Amino acid sequence: ERGLGTIITQLILQDFRGAADDGVGRSARKLAQVIRGAPALTHFACTRFEFKQDEPRDIGEALSGCTALTSLNLDNARLQGGVRYLPGALSTCTQLREVNLRNNDMGPQGMESLFPALLCWTQLTRLDLGSNRIGPDGMRLLSQTLEKTTAMTYLDVSHSLLGGEGAEVLAAVLPKLKALQHLGAGSNGIHGRSVNVLAQGLSQCTSLTSLNLASNEIGDGVGLITEQVLGACTALVRLSFAGNQVGDVGATALASALRKGGALAHLDLMNNDMMDSGILELAGYRGTMNEGSGLVNCTALTRLDIEVNKFGTAGMTALACCLPNNLRLEELTVGANDIGVEGTEKLAIAIALLPNLTSLDVGEVALKQTGAERLAVGLKGCTALTDLKLTECNIGAGGMAALVQGLWDSSKLTSLNVSENGLRAQGAVELSELLGRCTNLENLELGENMIGDMGATSIGGAVGQCRKLRVLDLRWNQISSRGFASLIQGLQQCPALRELEMFENDILGERGADLQLDALLYACVSLSYLGLADTRIRLEESQRLRSKWPGVEIACPPPGSA
């Protein structure tokens, strides 16, 4: 508005909620005025704007003069029906190469409105239309435009309600996208015959490096798709079949297809139905290693997600025998499987042989103290570990003591999640011994452990040495104002702290206790979120905090509530 527009080439407004603040569109009109004065604009991003009524008209008309525009991002702008105002204006932006209209719920009607502009964007290399529910009819229109954008390298149509019909339309246009490197088509209800048709289309995308088909109904068809894709796309590095009802038959077919998985770096199979027999096949192990199939062939693998399946000790044993062949593995998630103490022991042996392992998730496994002790033995060898997740494992104070010994030399640890483990006060005392050595720790989650004031005091006495700490979660821990006071003393030494969650702790029951927060907020200048719901904070105290610290999101009962 002040004449600076002529020199602006990039305008990026992330999480911008200006339009919602006044409710009459003044922010949108002011923004449009700025855009009109910026004819050299090449990159425009306005995410989470939450446009109202005809406000997109103002923005669209303003952008029509930006003929040099190459990148447009309106992710989660709540366009909905407002998308109809964009095409006429944006048709002049023929230099566009990257367009992100994700999360706008435009539907097939919105796709029909957008169609004229899409026909003009022949130089597109990146298009994200995910979470727009365009359906088969919208996919038909999109396919007509894709035929003219042969340079496309990135396409995302996930959460689009394509179904089998829309998936077949997508499959028909894929052979023309010779440059396509990433395809996202998750959460589309793809199943049955359409799986075969899609597999045939994908086999023509020889440049593909990343394929996301998560949360469909592909089931045993994963083997067919993988066989086709890995056979044709020798550079494929990321493959996701998460949430696809893959059972043992599908796992067996997938294992056979992985003969060609030498370049695969990330395989996501979480939230499926694979049991022990399927995992044995997937691992390529039945008493001895079977080098003809399975994960044993994936020597470039750096990430394996296989949590939330249905395998137990035998499946974990097979995986453990396979994993030492994947020496590049950096991230491993095996949580929410019934692997038991024996399976955990096998896992521990395997991870100790993975020199590059940085992230491990064994959450929602009934480890108890014995399992934690077995796992700790393996953790001693994981000197590169940065992220450990052990939620809902019921390890208790004894298990925490064992983990502390296992992590004693893990100086690179940045994130530790031991929520819901029944640690109580003694477990917190054990953990505090480790915190002094974790000087790089950024995220610490201890929710629902009933550590009480004694535990909070112990954590408070040690957490000050974690000067890089950004997130601390202590919800549901029976902490009173006395324990909170000790905790705050330590947290004042953590200038990087951004989020503190104290939900369901009786920390502010005494009058004046909230004044302790002022000392924390003065010291932790980066704090942006403070969770105080169900902490007995008084209405006038919450109002005072919000008024004094407007830059901090204070989660507690809103003004006017009881």
Image: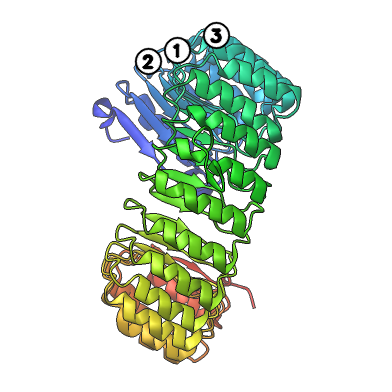
Q: For this rendering, which residue is in front, 195 or 73?
A: 195
Q: Quadrant of the C terminus?
A: bottom right
Q: Position of residue 335 (x, y in %)?
A: 56, 58
Pointer 3: what residue?
147
What is the quadrant of residue 358 in the picture? bottom left
* Left-right relation of 338 to 495: right
Most extreme residue toward the front is 288
**Residue 227, above or below 416:** above
* Left-right relation of 456 to 39: right
Q: Earlier in the sequence, mark 1 or mark 2?
A: 2
Pointer 1: what residue?
92
> Is residue 347 visible to us here?
yes
Q: Quadrant of the N terminus?
A: top left
Q: Residue at x 60, y 46 (%)?
A: 280
Q: Earlier in the sequence, mark 1 or mark 3?
A: 1
Q: Amino acid at mark 2?
A: Thr
> Could you tell me if the residues under marks 3 and 2 are in contact, i.e. CB atoms within 8 Å?
no
User: Crowding near pointer 1: few (<14 within 10 Å), some, many (20+)?
Assistant: some
Q: Amino acid at mark 1?
A: Thr
> Could you tell me if the residues under marks 1 and 2 are in contact, i.e. CB atoms within 8 Å?
yes
Query: Which structural element holds mark 1?
Result: loop
**Residue 236, above or below 173:** below
Pointer 2: what residue?
67
What is the quadrant of residue 222 in the picture? top right
Q: Position of residue 493 (x, y in %)?
A: 26, 76
What colouring method underlies this structural image?
rainbow
Q: Amino acid at mark 3?
A: Glu
Query: Which structural element holds mark 3?
Result: loop
